Image: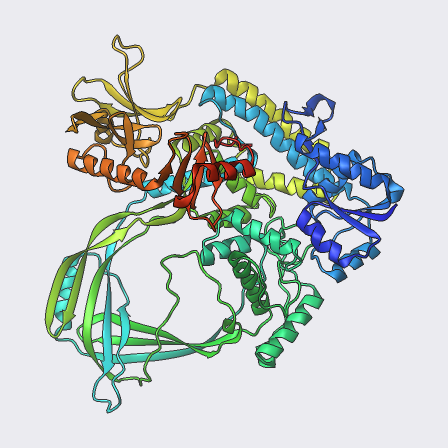
Amino acid sequence: MEENLVIVESPAKAKTIERFLGKEFLVKSSFGHVRDLSKKDISVDVENNFEPNYTISDDKKKIVSELKKYVKNAKMVWLASDEDREGEAIAWHLSEVLNLKEEKTKRIVFHEITKDAILNAIKSPRAIDKNLVNAQQARRILDRLVGYELSPLLWKKVKPALSAGRVQSVAVRLIVEREREIINFKTSSAFRITGIFEEMNSGKEKFPFKAELNKRIEKKADVENFLNSCLDATYKVESITKKPSKRSPAPPFTTSTLQQEASRKFGFSVSQTMAIAQKLYENGLITYMRTDSLNLSQAAINAAVVEINKLFGEKYSKPRNFKTKTKGAQEAHEAIRPTYMNNQRIEGSAAEEKLYELIWKRTIASQMSDAELEKTTINITISNSKNLFVASGEVIKFDGFLKVYMESTDDEENDKSEAILPDLKNGAELESKEIEAIQKFTNHPPRYTEASLVKKLEELGIGRPSTYAPTISTILNREYVVKETREGNDRKYTYLRLKSGKLIIEDRKEKTGFEKNKLFPTDIGSVVNDFLVQYFDDIIDFNFTASVEKDFDDIADGKIEWQKMLKKFYHPFHKKIEDTIKNSEKSSGERNLGNDPGSGKPVYVKIGRYGPMAQIGDAQDEEKPKFARLLKGQSIETITLNEALELFKLPRDLGEFEGLSVSVGVGRFGPYIRHNNKFVSLKKGVDDPSTIELSRAIELIAEKRESEKNKTIKVFDQDKEMLILNGRYGPYISYKKANYRIPKSVKPEELSFDDCKAIIDKAGVKKKPGKTKKK
């Protein structure tokens, strides 16, 4: 009989913990939750005090069965799932499913997987915290109620197969509202004027420096007048101001700030950051990665001080603890930090090493001295103008924490680097080497990245550390939002330059509107959002959603009963569902763009059964309406009448090639060329289906043929379905719609038919590739 059975939720965690415990402990994994609300129906008995119907999922039945055998043979069971509401719920579900007796069950928690932490947890076990369990149950049940009642309503009133959720719908609302701010934004421009100056007749080595005019000028004619006046102007230093300043380090990471910084520094998605952090935690390298606490333990601070003193010296050390200011912050964890401060680097994948080093640097920097700076401002008078040129610079007197780490910013336009200035005196005469004026345009509010959306949700008090990544995954998977990089467009601007007594004026081009990995609402996302805002404005109200989070916190603290909280929410919500079914119209986001010049019929854009579409004519007309799909990148909110009419010119006949017709059209997967019953996709951002010509279509056909030719390495007369092909990841065997890997030691072109059969037989029968179902 095993003395002790320890159950954790992940195999990696089990493996790490096993190293710290003796032979009298057996460590097993539940592989996450073992049971949940049944997927077959709503599984919540609303009339019976919201009693949930939990079932063991099919993929966990074998695991539960095995755990029951281990429990039977153990004298004591230690439930060691994570130290948060989700982890507490896992422990409770395990105790229920495994019929654990109170006297032979202990709950242990730790926020880092180290030998000391595990052994200390064993010394101080506790009972399962039902308040934490109830807070998790309340969230799970409330989200099930909202989803199960709102989703069918959307099927009836908007489009089949849609879904809604309490937090996800608020996230979509933020993205839709930001997009509309951008659409309605009116750009204006003004000229930024900068000059290069150096001191006259100083006898010292020349030290050119840059200064900017203290106002922007809007009109080009006024800029010309100003620059012409500079031909006769003299320049003098009016004042020099030097101010000492300091910069303090950022606090150690919470879940959201780690997600933000990993996005800014490495381009990681929120879910990617959490997956990497989970591995680091389970391997005992960092503390628990779901936290909104800025707190560090005294032991961690002491260890950081030792490391700082060793690496940089005592003057770089300044121990400090930070207080959490996040709205509704919860969980008594530490911030995210390395488990051992003396481990500056780890061995792992490239992504794991990068993320760990980021966490180490941020933690160490948080305990380091402030950076000491000196900011200098020089005001320069212009003899024939009331305006001033202003030069500003910054000198680091003591680098402090900057020796290790500098936090990134979401402000893409913000250049924090400031120039080093020459040593000048008041009244010094300056010479202008050149002055340039560049037309600058105002920028619309930035679109959200995954990380900046998390930041906004956190600011509003919506969601918690464990919910940010799943929320973003949900709105992307349901295609209410897309994450895209968009190339932008060329924009003209005016450039003026005064040098050596000559004024040069040029029209130049710049790229504008480039967006990298930004979140854009889809048309269906916008239409669903508008419907919910119209009929359920209170449910997806930012303050209401934050107040629900506060209710969950109060349940976790034992201040309110979870059933009472659900009752208060559910009955008004259910009544509103019933009223909306009776009183609301079907919503498609329809816009009337005007009339078709040819037929005089109205032209609409709206959401159809298969997505965004344009329509000419009405359903009640004698002649049936015409329909056309919108192209990728077009939106029912911004498309113009002329752009919509162009869609009806497709499919368009381009001519003949090899005696067969060539046409261009738009299908479910975007624009295509059709020739000889074969389809060739148009190049995104290069080819326009409304303007592409036959010569370009023939180029694309030839490119695809060449690509397919290079794809096939070998075919066999014995069986035409046996192919050796070139794939994205190298050569492989394709046989009867299944793919088989070729060993690296083998040259694909030298394989015989029998060799291929042997590789297939060794691999066994494979499932045919196909789309996986979304869960």
State the count of labels. Answer: 0
Q: Residue furthest bottom?
A: 203
Q: Is residue 204 above or below residue 397?
A: below
- The image's colouring method is rainbow
Residue 174 seen in this snapshot: yes
Among the 4 quarters of the image, the one containing residue 712: top left
Among the 4 quarters of the image, the one containing residue 709: top left
Q: Residue at x 61, y 51 (%)?
A: 278
Q: Residue furthest left?
A: 502
Q: Is residue 6 above or below residue 241?
A: above
Residue 728 seen in this snapshot: no
**Frontmost residue, 494 versus 90:** 90
**Frontmost residue, 124 versus 736:** 736
Q: Quadrant of the C terminus?
A: top right
Q: Residue furthest top?
A: 622
Among the 4 quarters of the image, the one containing residue 704: top left
Q: Is residue 215 above or below residue 145?
A: below
Question: For this view, does 42 lie left or right of residue 102?
Answer: left
Q: Is residue 8 above or below residue 633?
A: below
Question: For this view, does 691 lie left or right of residue 119?
Answer: left
Q: Residue at x 63, y 74 (%)?
A: 307
Q: Quadrant of the N terminus?
A: top right
Residue 578 at what x, y percent from top left? 56, 19
**Frontmost residue, 146 versus 734:** 734
Residue 38 at what x, y percent from top left? 66, 27
Residue 25 at what x, y percent from top left? 81, 52
Q: Residue at x 32, y 50 (%)?
A: 514
